Structures are given as C-alpha cells and as structure tokens.
Image (cartoon, rainbow, N blue to C red):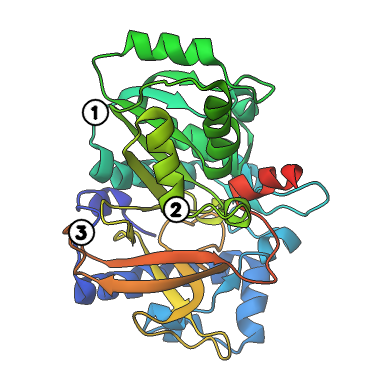
Amino acid sequence: MIKFNTVLEKHPFCMLKQEKTLFLNETLKQLTLFHYKNCDKYKKILDSLDFNPNAIDNYYNIPFLPVSLFKELDLLSVNRNDVFKIMTSSGTTGQAVSKIYLDKTTAVNQQKILVKIVSDFIGSSRIPMLIIDSPSVIKDRANFSARGAGILGFSIFGTDITYALDDNMKINISAIENFLEKHKTKQILLFGFTFMIWQHFYKELKKLNNKIDFSRSMLIHGGGWKKLINESVSRKEFKKALKDICGLTKVYDYYGMVEQTGCVYMECEYEHLHSSIFSDVITRRYNDFSSCNIGEKGIVQVVSILPQSYPGHSLLTEDEGIILGEDDCPCGRKGKYFQILGRLGNAEIRGCSDTYAAKFR
C-alpha cells in the first residue's frame, strides 16, 4: 500500500503533469488491485465490466463508481471489526445516505492530507476560529455526517473554537461579539457551509442591521450552491454581500465530498479550485463518458489516493464542471485547476448545505 510518510514530505502542489501522471498511475493501480482482492462487491463490478486491474496503464482507464452506489451497497475493503468510524453523506428526510467505512489508518491519513492541503492556503499556524454552525452537529463522534466531518476536520486549524449559532440554529450575537473582542488584534478564521452562512449568518446580520467587523478575517466555506442559485445569488454576489454586511474580503470556497474526505479542492486567490498531488479531477462527456478537453463542460470525476478502507478512489460525481487549465494557474500552484458549474439536472440534492436548505423550500 501507499507509504504516506514519503508522500507527505512533498509539497501538495509541486508536481507537473508528467510526474503526477506517473505517480497516480502507479498509486491508483495499487489501490485498484487492493480493493479488487479485498472487496467482493467491487471485484464483481470490475469482473462484470471484463476489466483486468493488472492491465492498468493509465488511471483515466480505471472504472469509476457513481457516488450514489455508496447509498445502495456497503462497500469496504477491511474487516468490519477494523472499522473505526462510519461517515454518512448529507441527505434530506427520506433520502438514502452514503455510508463510508474508515479504519484508523485511513482516518489518520485523511486528516494528515487535509492539513497538508489547507495549510498551503491559510498557513500552518493555528488561529482563533469561529464556526458558523451549531455545536450539536459534532456530538456523535463515531457516526459523522458530511457536515460534522467537515467541521471537525477544519477545526484542527483553529484555536479557541467558538460557534456562531446555538443548538436551535439561531445566531448568537453575544458569543460572536465576545469572540471578536477577545481576538481584536488577531487574524480570525471563519468556517461554515455555504447555505448556513447565507441563511443563518448573513440574513440575520442584515435583519438585525448589526455591523460586526470581520475585516481581519478569512472565511472558508463549502457545500452545495443549489439553494443560493435558486435565490439568484451568484458567487460574486455572495462575496459582495458578506463584504457589505461585515467587511469580509477574504472568502474562499472549497470542493469536497464525504466519499473522498481529506482530498479537498481549495479555491485560490484567482477563484480557481485546485487538485493536489493526492487527487485529480477528470471531466467526462455526457454521451460516452470519454474525457473532455480543457475548457469543455462535462461530468466531474474525482480520483484520490486516500480511500484504502473502501473502494472510493475513482468516483463519478453528480456535478458538472470545466477544467480551466493545468500547471499554469497565476497563483503558482501546479496541477489542474477547475470550476464547478453546479449539479447535474436530474441529480438529487445532496450537498452539505443543499440538503439542509431543502427544509427552507
């Protein structure tokens, strides 16, 4: 299996296309063979496709599983006694949820890789952190929703972690003001999911006409955009609204999913999402699933070297996106950079924010 200590010594955005391709070809072939030997259901899927994992010469050719399959099947490549944590995708009432089975090794590696990637954007020093959510989300540490997993994962970058919302999802102005007063000379990290920020933070501050100053802060947010798009709120308008209401100017999105926790795709200062050396993004054409060219819209496929306890290393998402370029982003990071355009037309709502937002229809 992968020697993660060796991989972690590398900068997460250091590999040019040729080197990264060789690395992912070999690593993802190893993972495919491992899951083929240790997950009977995965083996049956590959056998039904007449796919020989020993013949892999390019990771683009590894069969991808639709993310929805994790709602239908229990897919794991370790003994159930070795399962350390079960992660579940977000889902509205009545929807099935994905179940992702983690052993300790996979869970530890997820956290290490998350730290490696995010630190390249926000620095390695931990800073005061305000989470725009409720503390009740992370109470069950053994069975995490995608939302709880996101909060717990990003909490490692913060000190004096404070929640901006109470258990009833009501904004806690006094807690926010006390937090800001306590750290008035420091940079602050804000974290939350897109719709929660819009619904329970921005709208409430606007309603209260409360001019809280977050001009020294940085916001990292993720999750679905579907509800905001339905409200005709674009990414540009989202950022402008936050700047107008509380002075926030450093607002960065990220793309990720519970099926590949740890391998997040962070947004740089040029509003590009970036793949690291631990993962990659491929876009597929709608008619035949062939790979798209740069600049061509397609269905987003994600690959990751992290899933070792379950066969989630090559997945077809329910999102549309465009690869904007590779190795030449103005921010200087190597690898592919891309844009997510939204959900596929017939895909069910499932993002951390979107599933919660369904209650506000």
Pair 2/3: label in front? 2
Report x, y in % for residue 172: 56, 16
Q: Is any atom of residue 110 visible in this view?
A: no
Quickly name the residue at label 1.
125
- What is the C-alpha distance between the residues marked 1 and 3? 20 Å
Mark 3 residue element? loop
Q: Nearer the viewer, residue 191 or 172?
A: 172
The amino acid beneath tag 1 is: Ser
For the residues labelled 1 and 2, the Cα–Cα distance comes to 28 Å
Badge 2 density bin: few <14, some 14–19, many ≥20, Cα 10 Å: some
Residue 338 in the image: above or below residue 22: above
The foreground one among 309 and 126 is: 126
Callouts 1 and 2 close, C-beta under 8 Å? no
In the picture, measured across the screen, residue 17 lies left or right of residue 274, that is left
Amino acid type of the residue tagged 2 in the rendering: Arg
Q: Tag 3 or tag 1, which sits nearer the N-term?
A: 1
The residue wearing badge 3 is 333
**Residue 273 x/y as whole percent:** 35, 59
Quarter of the N terminus within the rendering = bottom left
Residue 46: mark in rendering? none
Q: Is residue 172 left or right of residue 220?
A: right
Is residue 177 depicted above or below 190 in this figure? Answer: above
Residue 168 point in image, percent of width and height: 69, 22
* x 46%, y 70%: residue: 321
Q: Which residue lies under the disc numbered 2?
A: 235
Closer to the camera, 209 or 317?
Answer: 209
241 to 201, vertically: above or below: below
Query: Cβ–Cβ below 8 Å for labels 1 and 3?
Result: no
Q: CA distance from mark 2 to mark 3?
A: 22 Å
In which quarter of the view is residue 155 placed?
A: top left
**Could you tell me which secondary element the residue under label 1 belongs to?**
loop
- Please identify, in this view, whether the residue under mark 1 or under mark 2 is nearer the observer: 2
